[in-house]
Structure formats: structure tokens, C-alpha cells
Amino acid sequence: MPGLAASGNSPPAAAPAPRRLSSPLPRRAPPSPSPSASTRAKPRPPPAPTDDSLDNPDLGPFLLKQARDAMVSGEGGGAARALEFAERAARALERRGEGAELELAMSLHVAAAIHCGLGRHADAIPVLERAVAVVTPPPEAPAPAAEADDQRGEEWSLAAFSGWMQLGDTHAMLGRMDDSIACYGKGLQIQMAALGDRDPRVAETCRYLAEAHVQALQFDEAEKLCRKALEIHREHSAPASLEEASDRRLMALILDAKGDYDGALEHLVLASMTMVANGRDIEVATIDVAIGNTYLALARFDEAVFSYQKALTVLKSARGDDHPTVASVYVRLADLYHRTGRLRESKSYCENALRVYAKPAPGAAPDEIGGGLMEIAAIYEALDDLDEALKLLQRALKLLEDAPGQWSTVAGIEAQMGVLYYMVGRYAESRSSFESAVAKLRASGERKSAFFGVLLNQMGLACVQLFKIDEAAQLFEEARAVLEQECGASHPDTLGVYSNLAAIYDAMGRVEDAIEILEHVLKVREEKLGTANPDVEDEKKRLAELLKEAGRSRNRKQKSLENLFGTNSQRAKKEAGRRWSNFGFRS
């Protein structure tokens, strides 16, 4: 975790891989006081205190030390024993009241860390909320007046900063990215108030918070924080420092996600030069993969192949042929050759990657393997091998479904499985996969993203195929509300949901509601696409049928010749590839 004090640890430098932004924030060790220098044998645990014994002023610190020693030793059921000591310490220190706040916060931090270590992240949340409440003064509290209080104020700031960051980590492990980011933001505010906004430790926290925004797909906020970190590191560090290189790699990821590929390439090249100067060959190879991704996005295929092959040579030499990072380069090459129409080479590289994932090197991270399987599944889907794509997604789901902090990734896998089940006509399984993904996103606080709205729409389509009309209507209505808020009423995704909602209202006998929606859709499509576009033609036919049923004609203004002869009419109509169901729904 970025530190308020000089001894604070830095966040990991590596940013998530491009086009795979759902990996969770790494777990970090909770802040703790300096370890005791004593090496003598640990004392026997004291008997459980009575209520009267909690009044002993020395009991709380003693129990806190016992909790930390039990965590380190791991003897005699270490975690459960340490948790008991930490909770008893908190009760004793709370009993002491004023003057014991810092030790109380520390005992709560320790208890929360033990809960997390046992996989009980939800139990850690209220403990950490109590810890930050203890050391975060209310807004109306007066600032300390005496210089003697400076040290105490710094200790309180450190405790509050550590608590908010640990709380943010714990929310992230539960997939609650909005809550996580809010906690990190409060920690950053406390740190800047204590150290100033140009301290190098502030830069570390800015970069960490930027990484969280990237994972939440909030790229504008991420870019602001990353630029601030880069400015501070360039001000305080030596030229071409490793800290600056880490900032540039993250900035490249952000700019790539925003479509600024030239800007991303510039930052990656500068970061690579720094890593070369510092002899970091593996980091150089990792950056070469990112450079290859950027060249691929720019359709500079020969340069992309060169970057991937260069990285592949280094990674094979340094880590062996069966390392997941080697497989990840195979996946990138498979994607490139698929895009350029060289399908035999694409499938060959997919098979090379799958051989590695089948028997990976010891210590391989499940999320790395799962992410690779997801990418290969997408290639097989594009090759129209849907059964193989489903098998790969099922393998990825089995790897990640019980892993902490992977809720968003698992939801993405289930959503993609839902699409594939829908495509092969297994509608009940499709609806079940979508339902599970939607439940995870609701629980993790991602109910306001465009992806969530699209997912609701897809689940609604599956319900239509199962003749669950009322449920489909509710899903389309919720999808409309989400996409209107996130994308606007004229966005293609929003218009697609409008069309589906009109179709479901028609099926339910709500013809007037369907007409009102279709008139809006047709008006927007005519303005954007021209009246001769195949999508516009389809909407016209649907609206005409509804108006005929309602016994009236369309109320429309005269369109200009420019719109009437708008866009590639007949050719585009023949090439239109949208999938429609019996009700006229859009996927």
C-alpha cells in the first residue's frame, strides 16, 4: 500500500494487460506497528479476562502483542488464536477510552487482516469502518494547537490513511470497485493533508488509485491521477527512473483504452528505454508485448509481429516454454493472425497456448490462465467454433469462480457464456448464465455501467425465447434506464434496447407505447443514418404495421433529399448481419 510514512510500501508497478481490465487489485498486507525486537520464547496465553480485568490499562497492549505474535508464529491454530487476542485487545482498549485510540485502531486493523486471511472479507468491512472512525476526527474538531501535538497528529494521520487504504483493498476483494475507489480517495486526501500534494509518497498513492479507476473503466479519472504521479516522480526522481517508467506504462494503458494509440506508443517506447538502461530484460519484454498490442490497434501488423516475436524470445529464455507469460504472447499472435485472415497460423498459436495452460509452470496465477482462456475462447467464437469456445469458458470459470476478488471477471465469463448459449439455441442455460452475471454485478455495485445495461438487454432476449414476456419487459426497461444514463438516448446500444422494448410492448398488447418508442427510434435513425439505411427500413416496416393496427398514420416532417439518399442503401441492406427473433428483437 502507498505509505504515508517513509517506510510505506509501493503498489505494484505492473498495470493490467490491455483489453483485459477486470483483474482485481492485488491484496496487500495491512499496516502494522514496527515488530518487536524481542526473540525470547512466546509467553503462554493468559486466561480469558473477566469484565473487571478489562479495566487493567496494560491488558490491551499486551493482548495486541499476543495477537501479532500468534499471527507470525502460526502455532496452535494461529489465525483463530490471533483473532481472539485482537478482539479482546480491542475490547480492553475501547474500555480505556481517550488516549488509547491509536492502539484500538491497530487492534482492529489486525483483526480485519485476520478475517481477510481466512477469506472472510465481508466480516472485515465493519471492523475496518470502526477502525477509521476511531482515528478520523469529525470535521468540526479543532486542530491541535501545541507543537507537542505534531507527532500525535502525524500518527493519527498514518493510522487513518492505513485504515482507509486497507478498507479500499477489502472492498476491492469483494468486487465493490465504487466503494473501493471512494476509500482510496479518502486515504489520498488524508495523505496530501499530512505530507503536501508533491510528496513522492503521494505519487505512489495517485498511481494506485489510477489503477483502481482503470479496473473500473473510469479512464478520464485514471488519466488525471496518473499524470499527477508522473509529474511528481519527474520532479523528485532521477531522470528516466523506474518510478517514472511505471507511470508511463500505466499511462499507455489508459491512453490505449481511450483510443489514443499514438500517445500510448510514445509512453511505451520511453518506458522501454528506461528498462533497457536498467537491465530489466523481462520488463522490456512485457513492454514489447504492449507495444505489439498498440501496433495491432494501429493496423501496423508487421511491426506488431516483430514486437511479439522479440518478447517471445526473451520470455522463453528467461522463464521457460511452459510459463503463462509465454502463452499470453501466443494468444496475441493468434489474435493478430486471425485479424489478418491467416486462420491456420491463428489456430496453431491457440493450440500452442492451450498446451501451456493445460500444464503450466508451478506457481502460475489462476487469473492469468483464466484470462488467457477467455481470449482464446473469443478467437474460437470468431472462427465459429462455438462448442470449443464454451468449453474454454467453462474451464476459465472453474478456475476463477471461487477466487477472491474475481467477481467482475467471473461475471464477464458468465455473460459471454450466456451469449454463446443463446447463439446455439440453449436459451434456458443462456438465461441462467446471464442471471448469475447480473446478480454478481448488482452485488459489486456495477449497476450503473453500460456493460450492465447491455447485459440486461441480452438476458431479456433469452427470456423472450423462453416466452417469459413480463420478465423480459422488466429487464428491457431497466436496461433502457441504465443506457440512457450512461450512453444517452441516441446511442446505438440504447436505440437497440428501445427497439426491443417496443417489440415486447407490442407482444403485450401495449400498441400505443410501442408506437411512441418506435417513432423516437425511427426519428433518431433517420437523422443519423439517412432514410434509405437498412436499419431505418426495418423500423419503418415495423412502425407501419403498428400504425395500421392502431388505425392511424405516422406523424413525420418532410425529410431533405440528402437524408433520403443517405447511405449505401441496397448494398448495406444485403450485408446487414443483425440477428432478429420472431418478435423482431435486436441483440
Image (tube, helix red, strand yellow):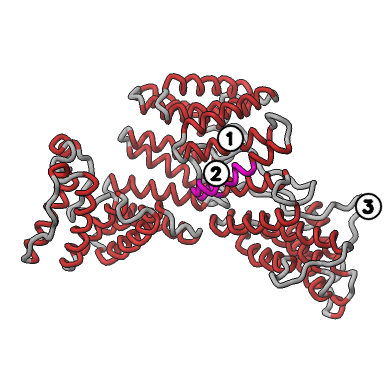
Secondary structure category for the residue under label 3 = loop
Q: Position of residue 358 (x, y in %)?
A: 51, 33
Rounded to the nearest whole Å, what is the CA distance between mark 3 and mark 2? 50 Å
Q: In the rendering, which numbered label is found on residue 217?
A: none
In the image shown, does 498 or 465 lie closer to the viewer? 498
Rounded to the nearest whole Å, what is the CA distance between mark 1 and mark 2? 12 Å
Residue 544 visible (yes or no):
yes
> Along the polypeptide, which appears first: circle 3 or circle 1?
3
Q: Nearer the viewer, mark 3 or mark 2?
A: 2
Can you identify the residue that label 1 sits on?
A: 249
Magenta segment's dominant SS is helix
Can you identify the residue that label 2 sits on?
A: 223
Amino acid at pointer 2 = Glu
> Along the polypeptide, which appears first: circle 3 or circle 2?
3
Rounded to the nearest whole Å, what is the CA distance between mark 3 and mark 1? 46 Å
Amino acid at pointer 3 = Arg
Image side of residue 494 versus residue 234, left or right: left
> Along the polypeptide, which appears first: circle 1 or circle 2?
2
Q: In the rendering, which numbered label is found on residue 40?
A: 3
Q: Is residue 401 above or below residue 56?
A: above
Q: Nearer the viewer, mark 3 or mark 1?
A: 1
Residue visible at 59% across and 46% down in the picture: 225
Q: Nearer the viewer, mark 1 or mark 2?
A: 2
- Does 220 appear in magenta? yes
Residues drawn in magenta = 213-229
